[in-house]
Amino acid sequence: MTTSFDFFNYLDNELYCEDVKVKDIIEKVGTPAYIYSKNSILEHFIEIRNAFEDVSPLICFSVKSNSNLSICKVLADAGAGFDVVSGGELFRVLELGVSPDKIVFAGVGKTSEEIKYALENDIFMFNVESPAELANIDRIAGGLNKRGRVALRINPDIDAKTHDKTTTGKKENKFGIDFDSAGQLIKDIDNYKNIDLKGLHVHLGSPIYSPDPYVQSLEKMYKFLQESLEDNARKRIEYINIGGGYCISYTGENVKKPHDFAAEIIPVIKKLGCKVIMEPGRFIVGNSGLLVTGVTYVKTATWGKKFIVCDAAMNDLARPSLYDAFHRAWPVNTDVMMPEIELPGADRSANDRLELVDIVGPVCESSDVLAEKRWFPDVKEGGLIAFFSAGAYGFTMSSTYNTRPRTCEILVDCDSFSTIRRRETYEDLITGEKEFLDAS
Ligand code: LLP
């Protein structure tokens, strides 16, 4: 039996990550655990870089998708830059020794402290999201005797046809600056004495399954540059940052690949004549990670509904409860073949090896359902289940809700594996509170 999903393969009824049995990792580190494939991450990074090589982009990995230091180091060593959205993310990549001229900083609410921290470290560029933020960067840069290099983040009012909660380029979204305001800012740019305007930025949302919204927004940018800006202002727009959002397959179905996006996007970039920055996150790490959970109990109600209660929960993988996101799940050890493609809601009642189940966590909320109405092979208490496509926005969105220690993270490289974040302990969870007990 050889179903495979990216660098995760079933061989003789056992799930492997690269050349390591997932079961062997879990025997050592316990559950729940995030497990990543280093070579999958590298392959995706190289795939997107090659797809766009015609325009030699600076690829800034979006740290929010997976901020583990060792993962960022794998990408830094491969030549990636980084897209950060907080002082904390900036701290992470500076700790790694990443060259500041490969760091871009986005976000609607950068605080003065964060701006100061970024300026002191000479980051490459701020993606500025409002006139007020531009004025603040100018003021702080002046005080530090530094130059603030900026791209204006445009809100192009384009629907990227993704989940409502992860759409960022429609006019009602909080992100970016509308074209008219951006035109005015550019006209007035010389009033900002400590600012170097370097480019424009756009990020439409995530995940995006078609190149069309990228092309539409870049066409709008082109029109804006041609029609709304004077020659000398246009010349300052040296960079175009086209953001992230490139999709991955969560179901095993074929989805558009970077070269499909590149084929449509590159001609418009060439028309714009700018240097390119990209900010992919999910595409690089999404399908490079699993969340592995242990089965704690199996319970079947008298009226027939079966629950598999596992030891991972919504605090470990928030996407299903937040966005109704679909993550494939399958036992780590099973003689039932994982379907090559699994679509949400597909009917597999004809297969008598499968039963309809909800896979749930122990958190005290009815939304703590990791997989709903799935046709699933028999699993026993003590068994292991893998949730696929969990490498992006998995661990980074985890919390300690219900005072649950966060999981460990493991990186596999060919036939070896190592811990890249230890499991939190109960002590970790009360550090920061304990010292105040006596005072209260
Ligand atoms: N650039 C900017 C400015 C962003 O806001 C984001 C993601 C990215 C790049 C990277 O997008 P990616 O290539 O990873 O799609 N938590 C949600 C996703 C939120 C994305 C936020 N911004 C999820 O789990 O689906």
Image: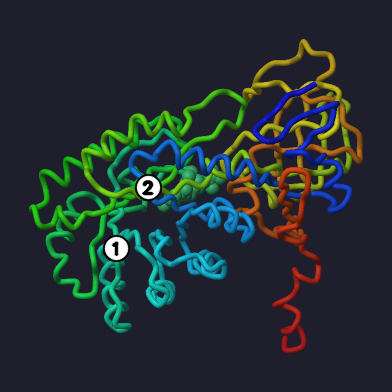
- With 26 as the anchor, is 343 left or right in this view? left
Q: Considering only vertical position in the picture, is 133 above or below 280?
A: below
Measuring from the top left, give residue 312's x and y in whole percent: 76, 47
The front one of 163 and 412 is 412
Q: Quadrant of residue 209?
A: top left
Residue 188 appears in which quarter of the rendering? bottom left
User: Residue 59's spot in the image, x, y percent?
Assistant: 43, 50
Q: Nearer the viewer, residue 89 or 359?
A: 89
* 63 in relation to 255, above or below: below
What residue appears at the point 68 percent right and 32 percent down from the top-left corner?
Answer: 328
Q: CA distance from mark 1 to mark 2?
A: 17 Å
- Label at residue 150: 1
What residue type is disc 2 on? Pro
Does label 1 point to a residue whose CB lies under 8 Å from ligand 1? Answer: no
**What residue is shown at x 33% (from left), y 46% (from top)?**
172
**Residue at which label 2 appears:** 57
User: Which residue is drawn at the image coordinates 14% and 69% (left, top)?
Assistant: 190
Q: Quadrant of residue 341?
A: top right
* Residue 106 visible, this orientation: yes
Residue at far top of view: 350
* Res 126 label: none
Q: Position of 6 compared to 197: left or right?
A: right
| Residue sitting farthest toward the bottom | 439
Q: Reply above or below: 107 against 376.
A: below
Which amino acid does the dot numbered 1 rest on?
Answer: Val
Question: For mark 1, does the 10 Å Cα neighbourhood hold few (<14), some (14 to 19), or many (20 or more) residues?
Answer: many
Secondary structure state at the residue bearing disc 2: loop
